[in-house]
Amino acid sequence: PMIQLTSLPIPSARMQVIHNSADAVASTVDVWLNDSLLLDNFNFRTASPFVDVQAGVDAVVTIAAAISIDTSRNTVAQFNLNLIEDSTYIAIANGIVSISGYTPNQPFGLDVFVGAREIAANSSNTDVLVYHGSTDAPGVDVIETSIPAGTLVDNLEYSNFTTYLSLATADYVLDLLDSTQATLIDSYSAPLS
């Protein structure tokens, strides 16, 4: 007689990868998860969609040169992860690879946020997660000036995330200032409507 075997589901998590390393050497990279190519020719200031990845096992994320054919050569950096089943992550590659040419030279790393959202907690709002990824900027404040909603983020330091901001779904103008609010670094439109 034949014995029917049941397959067990593979535990999974969700992950998005964001390339935020401004180092010219790493302007385009390949991202590997263990020995599988996850993102090919991944450019600076781009983000992947959220994808399913295996959870509950030790995994290695390898950042490699865009010409990579495996994880044994042209490796920029490797990071160990063990993702929690049914959790959602944002992983941001950030910092500087080169040993000179950048001041300050913040080391290349992978900053991981656990508890990412793919939909807003309140369906009538837009949830925004803010991350400070500028290696040469001081602690910053984010001020909304068009409504005006005022200070949205206060004294966010490099390589840190805020908690989620739940904003009315609208268009905003965001001023980025140093944490003393004496110097305007830049102003951005945020068309969330």
Image (spheres, helix red, strand yellow):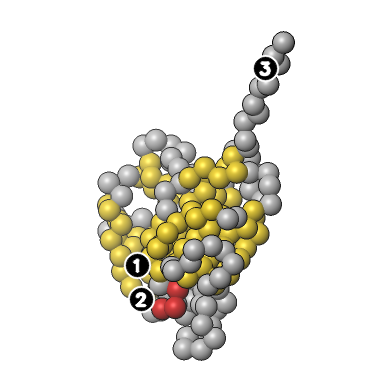
Q: Mark 3 touching mark 2, by CB under 8 A?
A: no
Secondary structure beneath label 3: loop
Mark nearer the N terminus (3 vs 2): 3
Would you say 181 lies left or right of 95 here?
A: left
Question: Looking at numbered disc 2 in the image, what kind of residue is underneath it?
Answer: Leu
Please state the horizontal and vertical placement of residue 141, each as a whole percent of the image. 45, 68
Question: Looking at numbered disc 1 in the image, what kind of residue is underneath it?
Answer: Asp
Along the line of sight, which residue is nearer the eye, 30 or 126? 30
Along the line of sight, which residue is nearer the eye, 46 or 182? 46
Q: Quadrant of the N terminus?
A: top right
Mark nearer the N terminus (2 vs 1): 1
Q: Badge 3: few (under 14), some or many (20 or more) residues near its Cα, within 10 Å?
A: few
Please state the horizontal and vertical placement of residue 82, each as a whole percent of the image. 66, 51
| Residue 131 vertical position relative to residue 181 in the rendered view, above or below | above
Residue underneath mark 2:
184
Q: Quadrant of residue 66?
A: bottom left
**Residue 88 appears in the figure:** no
Q: Badge 2: few (under 14), some or many (20 or more) residues near its Cα, within 10 Å?
A: some
Secondary structure beneath label 2: strand
Residue underneath mark 1:
175
The Cα atoms of the two marked residues, 2 and 1, are separated by 7 Å
The Cα atoms of the two marked residues, 1 and 3, are separated by 62 Å
Front label number (3 vs 2): 3
Along the line of sight, which residue is nearer the eye, 89 or 128? 89
Numbered-mark total: 3
Residue underneath mark 3:
4
| Identity of the residue furthest to the top in this view | 1
Residue positioned 27% across, 53% down in the render: 191
Q: Badge 1: few (under 14), some or many (20 or more) residues near its Cα, within 10 Å?
A: many
Residue positioned 31% across, 50% down in the render: 192
| Residue 81 vertical position relative to residue 121 in the rendered view, above or below | below
Q: Mark 2 touching mark 1, by CB under 8 A?
A: yes
